[in-house]
Image (spheres, grey):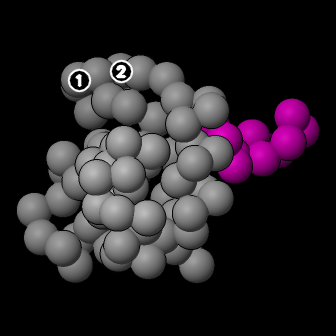
Amino acid sequence: MSEAQRRKVFGDAGRKAIEDGANIYSVVNARKAMAEVEMFGRTVQVTYAGTGSRKKKRPPRLMPEEIYRQAETREQAIRLLYKHGYLR
């Protein structure tokens, strides 16, 4: 898949997350349950995919777009990708 095709299919942040080692299925599935919510005093992009069953709900996960928006360094982005379940 060319870089242009990857960017079209996954978006810039999704492509970057996959290149940084994120699980491709986590990135793709995150888009299925994407929402914008008020967090940290502003609107952020989150996903409810992979947050558990009805009985055991976890807070929403940040989308790769939001992770790269908040991270100041690549190392910080990697930590956030791991924390939000894109890296194992």
- Neighbor class of circle 2 (other Cα within 10 Å; few <14, some 14-19, many 20+) is few
The residue under the point 62% across, 32% down is 32
Vertical placement of residue 88 versus 65, above or below: below
Q: Is residue 31 highlighted in magenta?
A: no
Q: Which mark is residue 42?
A: 1
Which image quadrant is residue 47 in? top right
Q: Which mark is residue 38?
A: 2
Q: Position of residue 14 (x, y in %)?
A: 39, 53
The answer to whether mark 1 and mark 2 are in CB contact below 8 A is yes
Q: Position of residue 46 (x, y in %)?
A: 46, 35
Which image quadrant is residue 73 in? bottom left
Q: Nearer the viewer, residue 41 or 44?
A: 44
Alpha carbon separation for disc pair 1 and 2 = 5 Å
Quadrant of image for the C terminus: bottom right
Q: Which residues are magenta?
A: 48-57
Tell me, yes or no, if residue 1 can be seen here.
Answer: yes
Q: Is residue 4 left or right of residue 57?
A: left
- Neighbor class of circle 1 (other Cα within 10 Å; few <14, some 14-19, many 20+) is few
The residue under the point 32% across, 30% down is 44
Residue type for callout 2: Glu
Q: Is residue 87 left or right of residue 50?
A: left
Q: Is residue 53 highlighted in magenta?
A: yes
The residue under the point 35% across, 63% down is 2
Q: Position of residue 9 (x, y in %)?
A: 45, 45
Q: Residue furthest front?
A: 2
Q: Secondary structure at mark 2?
A: strand
Q: Position of residue 29 (x, y in %)?
A: 64, 45
